[in-house]
Amino acid sequence: MTEQDYLLAWSAYAVAALGCLLVWFRLTGWLWRFLREPLRLLMGVLLLTPTIIDPTKELFAPAIAITALDLLFKVGNNVWRAVADLALYGLIALGLYLVFAALRWPIERWWRGRSSQPAPIADDEPTLREIMDREQQPVEALQPSADANGRLRIEPRL
């Protein structure tokens, strides 16, 4: 396999993995946020984790593909290395997500508390009831008018 073939294969896999991630994001969009985000993280780790297959040439392949193919066909000895890479990257991603969630939680509580406080009302401003009482029109203010078809309608005078 030449260097161009290797890069072409990784490019095709990257496009396919991003397409799968997009589908997974759409499938998990209806879930509760604290279930949706870890599932999306897990799928991202499964699809985007590389593992080394030839240490002498430094060739990498997707860890989930190496694991599936080695277990299915019972060939190669890269299964444990691929599973170890998946577990390591999964733990790192989970730790980063927990730090992100721990930082996000007090900020969201502060933002919700800030937005739920009513705005201060000036004492000299009229209330909505006062405005409506001033602008209330009697029934005599309604006058008939013709629409485009010539039918009469009753509309309020502004």
Image (cartoon, helix red, strand yellow):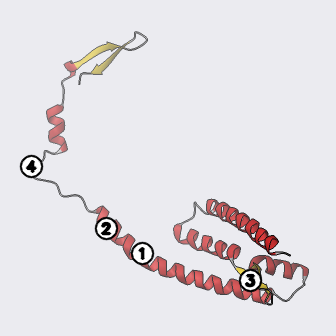
Would residue 99 be found to the left or right of residue 55 on screen? left
Q: Residue furthest top?
A: 150
User: Mark 1 sits on what residue?
Assistant: 105
Q: Say which residue appears at 65% left-offset and 61% top-offset.
A: 22
> Which label's residue is closer to the chain start, 1 or 2?
1
Rendered image: mark on residue 113: 2
User: Image height check: is 17 above or below 122?
Assistant: below
Q: Quadrant of residue 116?
A: bottom left
Q: CA distance from mark 3 to mark 2?
A: 46 Å
Instruction: Name the secondary structure under disc 3.
Output: strand
In this rendering, is residue 136 above or below 91? above
* Residue 46 drawn above or below residue 18: below
Q: Residue at x 45, y 80 (%)?
A: 102
Earlier residue among tags 3 and 1: 3
Q: Earlier in the sequence, mark 3 or mark 2?
A: 3
Q: Assign a secondary structure to mark 1.
A: helix
**Residue 17 on image: x %, y %:** 71, 67
Amino acid residing under circle 3: Thr
Q: What whole-number distance in Å separates the C-alpha atoms at marks 2 and 4?
A: 27 Å
Circle 3 sits on which residue?
Answer: 51
Of labels 3 and 4, earlier in sequence is 3
